């Protein structure tokens, strides 16, 4: 036996986490879910008239106008969806 460091071959130490993480990315298991119809609709709206912005607004004329605009574009989106279901 020679002096110095003795090699014992490959050691498996805390390897399970890394392999599991590698398989998640290698197998493409982590993927974004497609948007729902309502989420696609909200993304097409101006940020000022999205549902979250309306919820933060105080009652008043500005909220009233923004709500009317939101409802108008929602109805327009649904009308287009009925006329062209592929889009």
Image (spheres, rainbow, N blue to C red):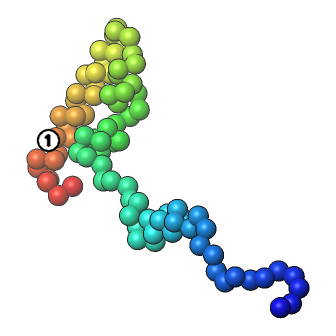
Residue at 39 percent across and 16 percent down: it is 57
The single residue placed furthest to the bottom in the displayed view is 1
The picture quadrant where one finds residue 60 is top left
Horizontal arrangement in the rendering, residue 30 relative to residue 78 (left or right): right
- For label 1, the SS is helix
Crowding around mark 1 (Cα neighbors within 10 Å: few <14, some 14 to 19, many 20+) is few
User: How many numbered callouts?
Assistant: 1
Tell me, yes or no, if residue 25 can be seen here.
no
Residue visible at 38% across and 59% down in the picture? 31
Which of 45 and 21 lies nearest the eye of the viewer? 21
Work out whether 83 lies above or below 13.
above
- Location of mark 1 (residue): 79
Q: Residue furthest right?
A: 3
Question: Residue at the spot x=25%, y=46% of the render?
Answer: 36
Q: Position of residue 81 (x, y in %)?
A: 16, 47
Tell me, yes or no, if residue 36 can be seen here: yes
At a point 30% along the width and 42% down the height, the residue shown is: 39
Please tell me which residue lies in front, 56 or 45: 56
């Amino acid at each position: 036996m020679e002096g110095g460091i003795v090699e014992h071959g490959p050691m498996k130490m805390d390897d399970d986490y890394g392999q599991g993480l590698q398989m998640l990315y290698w197998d493409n298991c982590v993927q974004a879910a497609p948007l729902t119809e309502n989420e696609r609709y909200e993304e097409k709206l101006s940020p000022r008239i999205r549902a979250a912005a309306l919820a933060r607004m105080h009652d008043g004329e500005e909220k009233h106008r923004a709500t009317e605009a939101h409802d108008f574009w929602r109805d327009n989106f649904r009308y287009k969806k009925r006329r062209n279901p592929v889009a």
